[in-house]
Image (cartoon, rainbow, N blue to C red):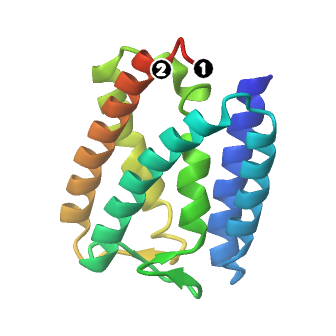
Amino acid sequence: MKIFLILSGFQITWLSSIFGEYYNYPLLGFIVGILYLFIFFRFIKIKTNLLFLYLFFSIIGYTFDTILSYNNLYYFNSAFNVGYLPIWLLTLWLSFNTLLLSVLIFLRNRIILSFILGSILGPLSYYSGIPLNISYTTNIYLAFILMFFFWGLFMSLYSKVIEIYFNKF
């Protein structure tokens, strides 16, 4: 039940972010994300350690997205940005990281599987914004090659962290 609730919370945050941007409510994803994170951390016992871990991974992801956007390789058509990115990406990255020690636990000690899944599913989620006209790319091949390697390595790092911290949480 816990896995279902966490996955649902992330998916609702993701959908709110995408459709909020699509229907010109750019704060919707941010607000839903804040509510989800508040509820999530309300029921988590070891808040400080998890918050540090989630912030660490969120900063890595947010930095990658900022680099893509800064270089116009992949950018968002958003009405409400923080720096180069939509405000909802702040809560979306944190919400994604709530999947780390529950939903994505099956990736523990499976670095190759983590790399493969990350390399495929990560770029696909970015691509979903292009047909909706909420994101654009000036060089789809370079952008997706970078996403392929970033997400593969990112999820491989996830796999190692899950392996290290599995017994702590």
Q: Look at the picture and state if 43 lies above or below 67.
A: above
Which residue is found at the position 40% from the left and 26% from the top? Answer: 161
Find the residue positioned furthest to the front: 48
Q: Which mark is residue 63?
A: none
Give, as a three-letter code, the residue at label 1.
Phe
- Residue 78 appears at what percent x and percent y? 54, 83
Write down the residue under mark 2.
165
Is residue 98 shown to the viewer in this render?
Answer: no
Q: Secondary structure at mark 1?
A: loop
Q: Look at the picture and state if 160 lies above or below 43.
A: above
Which residue is found at the position 79% from the left and 56% from the top? Answer: 35
- Residue 10 appears at what percent x and percent y? 67, 46
Q: Look at the picture and state if 1 lies above or below 41.
A: above
Give, as a three-letter code, the residue at label 2.
Tyr
- Residue 26 appears at what percent x and percent y? 66, 78
Write down the residue under mark 1.
169
Q: Quadrant of the C terminus?
A: top right
Question: Left or right: where does residue 118 sit relative to residue 165?
Answer: left
| Quadrant of the image occupied by residue 64 | bottom left
